[in-house]
Image: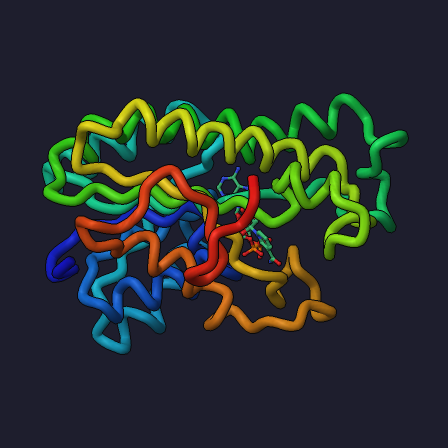
Amino acid sequence: MSTTKKIALVTGGNKGLGLETSRQLAAEGVTVLLGARDLAKGEASAAPLKAEGLHVRAVKIDVDDRADHTAIAAFIEKEFGVLDILVNNAGIMVDGGALGTNTTLTVSEENTRKTFDTNFFAVVALTDALLPLLRKSEAGRIVNLSSILGSLTLHATKGSPIYEAKTFAYDTSKVALNSYTIHLAHALKDTKIKVNSAHPGWVKTDMGTDAAPMNVVDGSKTSVWLATLPEDGPTGGFFHMHDTLPW
Ligand code: NAP
């Protein structure tokens, strides 16, 4: 797929995987709308990319705020009339990991709901708001940032790499997101839009922590690949790099 003049929106683009995904997409010739819930942070993150000559523009989008969904759809419609790539990257892990209170027996309902609001409901609502613009694309691509922690199969398999990593609220929100990927890909199967879930790897970011083995450059490759899939590429899949993960 030629990515020249494609328009992408990356949510949570001000740091971590979202920022590096924005950089890599822009380096492929895509015009990137770098989404940030704090526009000042987004602009600060976009500035060095712009200085490199990349077509990156910070836009305000708090994915939990439905008014921002309406506003970003109206902005993209007015400025470009089309959206080619949506990377649903923004995500949270509340009180993360087994060291926090996000465990199966201890996580609060409030934290589970908060996690689902951002990692699942916001993705569905934002994608709905942007679908009319994605339908206008010659090659619409939706990438949902999932996680290997959203694999039911690996969670249920004793000895799998994630068998002991039971961060309940986060994991179940990514399971729901994966189910959305399958359902949306089916609903759009007769269109030019492809929908896939990405596991970036365990990546050094604020969420992944310094203990993670992978850097953001490699960690962003799965999203960038899925965002720029050719016409004969997959839809309705769950991938890490080019490998399929079990649901
Ligand atoms: P990160 O460094 O914590 O960055 C998360 C990004 O999401 C930040 O830009 C943050 O904005 C944004 N965000 C959070 N809530 C938001 C909201 N309501 N509206 C808009 N933006 C919001 O995390 P990351 O590691 O880059 O993670 C990116 C995605 O990859 C997430 O979906 C995560 O679940 C997934 N993932 C990460 C790893 C890993 O090892 N790092 C592994 C598997 C999957 P603020 O700066 O304003 O907080």
Location of residue 41 in the rendering, given as x and y in whole percent from the top left corner = 46, 56
Work out which residue is located at the far bottom of the displayed protein and give it.
Answer: 52
| Camera-side residue of 2 and 16 | 2
The image position of residue 131, as x and y in percent, is 25, 28
Relative to 198, 94 lies left or right: right
Question: Would you identify the image quadrant in which residue 169 lies?
Answer: top right
- On the picture, is 71 further left or further right than 89? left
Q: Is residue 19 visible?
A: no
The number of numbered badges drawn on the structure is: 0
Measured as percent of width and height from the top left, residue 215 is found at 56, 73
Colour style of the rendered protein structure: rainbow
Identify which residue, 163 or 109, lies in the foreground.
163
At which x and y percent is residue 122? 48, 29
* The C terminus, quarter of image: top right
**141 relative to 108 in the view: left or right:** left
In the displayed structure, would residue 127 be above or below residue 210?
Answer: above
Q: Is residue 207 above or below residue 100?
A: below
Q: Which residue: 21% across, 30% down?
A: 74
